[in-house]
Image (tube, rainbow, N blue to C red):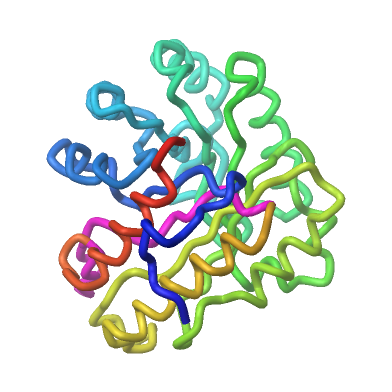
Amino acid sequence: MTGIVPKKNHVPSHLKEFGFYHSGWDEDDIPEVAKFSTFVDVWCFDIDLMEVARRHGLKIWVALAPIFFKDFGKNKQEDYRERWERARHQLLPFKDIIYAFDPLDEPFQRSSLPDKELKLYFEEIGALIKKDFPTAKLAITFTHNTVSQARFQLIVPENFNLFGVDYYYGVNFQNKIVEKLMHKTQHMDAKYYLIPRGFKTTNSGYETLSVTELLLRARQAYNFAVSHSKVEVVFPFHWKGFVEHTETYIGIENIPVLRNEYEKMGRAISRDR
């Protein structure tokens, strides 16, 4: 298993972007991750943080969930068109640095809408976005359960063009489920992002992985990325630690050995990009 040694690694041109989930949620984090990232993820309402990202030469990956969904993503916002109209005016000044829009994380797992209805809603959202942001990517993160559905190809929004799948279990990176996603969307003009697990947690629902095992996952993800020409982004989950339902999640920021590995990876990918 090769390590991440920028002086010896040639990063192919298809691998263009690197950033962390939860990297743009706090102003103090942005200048830190700017040293080895090309973008940060931000909420659509955090205009001040978008300004900080711009000052540090970063692109932004914009999460739009509050505009289009309510009840933690379960249902549509009734006034989504009005919400989007207000948001787009705030976002237009950042048109030059917006890399991707993400309407809802894990939508087919999270939403209460029937899959076909959700697909049509996403295609409507995509059309609204493309009117003013034609070059921005339209991104969806699927769960492995969604990708494994026999009818998955029937529910993928046709006008989205950047796909990822998350699966945080097991020692090894989820090569097989990413390959399944790529195979099932091969008819589309899409690119892909990888989401290697980069966290430790007290949540017993996740397997306990050692730092060595998380390092292995990072290196496997990198090797997968450089060997698959449609992979454009490495997007580890996650940078910032947090507490959810009393369970603690420790992010890459506070796992020094893992952080060092991702810093090397990010510097290699972001150089000359």
Q: What stretch is highlighted in magenta?
A: 230-252
Residue 266 x/y as whole percent: 36, 52
Q: Which residue is at 57% across, 21% downward?
A: 81
Q: Could you say which quadrant of the image residue 198 lies in? A: bottom left
Q: Which residue is at 48% across, 44% downward?
A: 17
Q: Which of 152 and 181 is in front in this view?
A: 181
In reply to whether residue 239 is colored magenta, the answer given is yes
271 displayed left or right of 110:
left
From what the image shows, is residue 106 above or below residue 217?
A: above
Q: Nearer the viewer, residue 98 or 75?
A: 98
62 displayed left or right of 185:
left
From what the image shows, is residue 262 above or below residue 2?
A: above
Total labels: the figure holds: 0
From what the image shows, is residue 101 above or below residue 115?
A: above
Q: Which residue is at 57% across, 40% downward?
A: 76
Residue 112 x/y as whole percent: 60, 56
Q: Which of 89 and 80 is in front in this view?
A: 89
Q: Which residue is at 26% across, 40% downward?
A: 34
Residue 159 x/y as whole percent: 75, 36
Residue lying farthest to the left in this orientation: 28
In reply to whether residue 167 is colored magenta, the answer given is no
Residue 158 x/y as whole percent: 79, 41
Q: Which of 270 and 235 is in front in this view?
A: 270
Q: Could you say which quadrant of the image residue 120 lies in? A: top right
140 displayed left or right of 147:
left
Residue lying farthest to the front in this orientation: 8
191 displayed left or right of 15:
right
